[in-house]
Amino acid sequence: MGTVLALMELSRDREVLPSSLEALAVGKMIAEKVGLKLAALVMGGGIEQAAESLRAFPTDEVLVVDQPLLEVYQPELYTQAVEQVCSEIKPDYLVMGETFQSIDLAPRLAFALDSGLVTGCVDLEFDSGETLFIKPVYSGNVMAAYAVEGVPRLATFRSKSFEPAKPGESAPSPVRSLAISLDQSSVKIQAVEQVLSGNGHAQGLENAEIVVSGGRGLGGPEGFEILRELADQLGGALGASRPPCDLGWIEPSAQVGITGAIVAPDLYVAVGISGSTQHVGGMEGAKTIVAINDKEDAPIFKIADYGVAGDYKEVLPQILEGLGRSK
C-alpha cells in the first residue's frame, strides 16, 4: 500500500503549526479516497515533544528525523533530508501547508524528486481515480484544477482552506525514527541570524486569526504604530499591502497579497488600503473584512463586510477607546 506523506512545520517554540495540521487533514482525505496510508513527517533538533503530540492525530505512522543540523531551516539541508526520506518511504503524495518556508522548499523538492508540484491549493477533487488539486488563478477570478505528473505528487495548501486535523480517539500512532546523512560540503546558503519579524505572531501571518493591515494611505511609517496598537488590542498580527513594504515603512515579511502572504483570518482589518487586485488576491478568503479608507470610492469597499469612509487618524482612536471600555 502506498503512502501520503504530510510534512509538518514547527514554530520557533517547536510546536506544530496550524497550517501543517490542515495539511495533515488534507493528507487524511487523500489517503481515504485513494486507499493509501498516511504518515506525518516531523524534522528538526530536539523535537521529541512535537513528535509525541502528533501521535494523538489519526495517522498510520509518525516519522521523525531528529537532526541538530535541521534545528533552523536551511533549504539545502532540508531538501536533502526530505529527499532521503522519500527515497526510503516512496510516498505517492507529499503535502504541506503553504508558508514562507514551504514556498521556498517545495520547488526545491519537486526538482530534486523530478516530480510535479501545485502550490496555493484551496481544495481537492477526485475524478476517476485521479486526484485534482484546485487553486485560484488570475488573481482569484478563476478556479483551476491540476493533475500532477510524477511521483510523489507535491502540493502546498493555503492556510484556512481546510479544517485542521483533530486528535483521534484510537490508540496513539506508532513513531519511527529515520536516520539520514547530510552533506554539508555542498551547502551554499548559511543561516546567520534569526530575526523576529515583529508582526505580532511568531507563527506568521498565514496562521493568524486576526490581521490588521495598512496601506499607502497611512502616509508614512508612523501610521503603523497605531495599527500595531490595534493589532495588539485585538490579539492579532500586523500586515501591510505591498507599497508600505517597498517604501520601507514596515518589514517585508508583513506583506499580504499575491506576492506576499496569503491569509484567511476570521477578521481582516484593512486601513488605508485601496484594494488592488494583487492585495485582494491574498486576503479575500477572510471571513469578515473591515475597511477604513478616506476615499469613498476605494475598490476595497466592494469586498468589505463593513466599511468606514474617513480619516484613519480620527477613526482608529475611537475604535481603540471603545476596545478599552469593553475590556
Image (tube, rainbow, N blue to C red):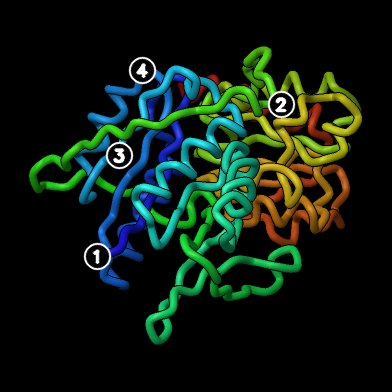
Residue 22 is at least partly visible in this image: no
Determine the CA span between mark 3 and mark 2: 28 Å
Q: Amino acid at mark 1?
A: Met
| Residue that mark 3 sits on | 63
- Looking at the image, which residue is at 76% across and 35% down? 214
Q: Nearer the viewer, mark 4 or mark 1?
A: 1
Which residue is the site of mark 1?
Answer: 1
Please give the name of the residue rendered at 36% of the width and 50% of the height, measured from the top-left corner. Answer: 24
Q: Secondary structure at mark 2?
A: loop
Kindly identify which residue carries mark 2.
Answer: 188
Instruction: Please give left or right for residue 194 compared with residue 181 in the image.
Output: right
Q: Are marks 2 and 4 in contact (CB under 8 Å)?
A: no
What's the mark number on residue 46? 4
Q: x, y (%) of residue 89? A: 34, 50
Q: Secondary structure at mark 4?
A: loop
Q: Earlier in the sequence, mark 3 or mark 2?
A: 3
Residue placed at 49% from the left, 47% from the top? Answer: 97
Q: Looking at numbered disc 4 in the image, what kind of residue is underneath it?
A: Gly
In terms of depth relative to the viewer, which is nearer, 217 or 277? 277
Q: Relative to 112, does residue 250 appear above or below in the rendering?
A: above
Q: Earlier in the sequence, mark 3 or mark 1?
A: 1
The one nearer the camera, 219 or 28, is 28
List x then y, in percent, for residue 209.
50, 39
Residue 78 spot, x, y in % from top left: 53, 34
Identify residue type, mark 3. Leu
Q: Residue furthest bottom?
A: 128
Mark 4 to mark 1 CA distance (whole Å): 31 Å
Judge left or right: residue 92 versus residue 248. Answer: left
- Residue drawn at (58%, 56%) of the image: 285
Pick whichever of labels 4 and 3 is earlier in the sequence.
4
Q: Which mark is residue 153?
A: none
At mark 3, the secondary structure is strand
